[in-house]
Image (tube, helix red, strand yellow):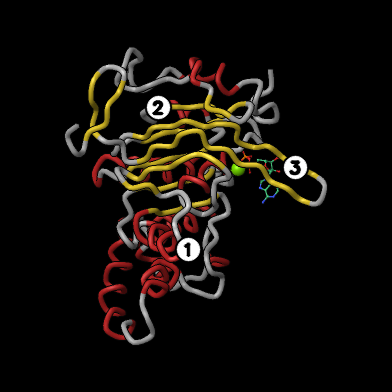
């Protein structure tokens, strides 16, 4: 077998950036056990913009946390290209989280006492020792300024999160997430708390990072139009990827997907948001 390729049913394919097999995760709290993931298989080609949909509580965040090494699997395997990354020692996991992977969340998770600029610089600060930081600080600041400019926030550099709108906070969070040049960005309901205009700005930014920089993006969303505008949509249901409703890009379905195709995939799961 050639390096950089994996065997598939129909021959060989480039090694996907992420591959998960048989992921299982159960939460136990006191006497209550919640079996969240019951054998999730997923392959993500490098450069894909993948949407993950499913009912509240279906395990979307749990899946992102496992794939992004924020939490550990009970069973199953995860590969980052040819490297197995489930069950790594915590030092190695920290490296992945601070380097290879970037994260953005519905509620931004910015540091409230830090300005936008300081928030964007913070991953470099975390990655540096106290001795390295004085030497790295200048370059980190310049890069953070460039990134803030890229997300259209040069004029908000010195603002704290409480002085910014939701959209501005999320744009700051995106700049922070790409500070260390990750290869995969996990976005958990990144527009879930934003109005339509701010939400579509965030989507444009994510698409630009995907297309221009080749960043692989995994996004959880309840917004079917946004999901439909990405390369592929998968649905989590009963603890597994519902392959029956998977809608691969580049195969037989045109891109972007017709929102009505997706409506079926989402309807009946997000009852609160998509009644009927
Ligand atoms: N740390 C935890 N401890 C116990 N139960 C949890 C924990 N995290 C998530 N759960 C439960 O697991 C299920 C899936 O949660 P989650 O992955 O957040 O779903 P989603 O993101 O699809 O809404 C939910 O029932 C949730 O209550
Ligand atoms: Mg969630």
Badges 1 and 2: C-beta atoms under 8 Å apart? no
Residue at label 2? 232
Instruction: Give whichever of 61, 161 is nearer the camera.
Output: 61
Instruction: Give whichever of 55, 21 is nearer the camera.
Output: 21
Label 1, residues with CA under 10 Å away: few <14, some 14-19, many ≥20: few
Label 3, residues with CA under 10 Å away: few <14, some 14-19, many ≥20: few
First of labels 1, 3 by sequence position: 3
Ligand 1 under 8 Å from disc 1 Cβ: no
Give SS at disc 2: strand
CA gap, disc 1 to disc 3? 25 Å
Q: Does 100 sit left or right of 268 as displayed?
A: left
Specify the label residue 269 is tagged with: none
Specify the label residue 33 is tagged with: 3
Q: Residue furthest top?
A: 252
* Position of residue 23 measured from the top left corner of the image (x, y, whole percent): 53, 37
Is residue 190 visible in the rendered structure shown here? Answer: no
Specify the label residue 90 is tagged with: 1
């Amino acid at each position: 077998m050639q390096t950089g390729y994996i065997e598939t049913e129909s021959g060989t394919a480039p090694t996907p950036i992420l591959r998960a097999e048989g992921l299982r995760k159960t939460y136990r709290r006191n006497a209550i056990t919640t079996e969240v993931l019951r054998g999730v298989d997923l392959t993500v080609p490098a450069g894909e913009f993948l949407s993950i949909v499913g009912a509240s509580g279906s395990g979307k965040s749990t899946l992102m946390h496992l794939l992004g090494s924020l939490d550990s699997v009970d069973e199953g395997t995860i590969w980052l290209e040819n490297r197995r990354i489930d069950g790594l020692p915590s030092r190695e996991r920290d490296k992945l989280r601070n380097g290879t992977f970037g994260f953005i969340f519905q509620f931004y998770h910015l540091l409230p006492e830090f300005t936008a600029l300081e928030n964007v610089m913070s991953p470099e600060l975390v990655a540096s020792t106290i001795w390295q930081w004085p030497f790295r600080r200048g370059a980190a600041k310049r890069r953070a300024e460039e990134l803030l400019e890229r997300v259209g926030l040069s004029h908000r550099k010195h603002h704290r999160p409480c002085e910014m709108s939701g959209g501005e906070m999320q744009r700051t969070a995106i700049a922070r997430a790409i500070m260390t040049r990750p290869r995969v960005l996990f976005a958990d309901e990144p527009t879930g708390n934003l109005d339509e205009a701010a939400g579509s700005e965030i989507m444009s930014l994510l698409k630009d990072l995907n297309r221009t920089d080749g960043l692989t993006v995994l996004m959880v969303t309840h917004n079917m139009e946004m999901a439909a505008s990405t390369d592929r949509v998968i649905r989590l249901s009963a603890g597994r990827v519902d392959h029956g409703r998977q809608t691969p890009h580049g195969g037989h379905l045109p891109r972007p997907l017709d929102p009505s195709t997706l409506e079926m995939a989402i309807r009946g799961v997000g009852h609160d948001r998509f009644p009927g």
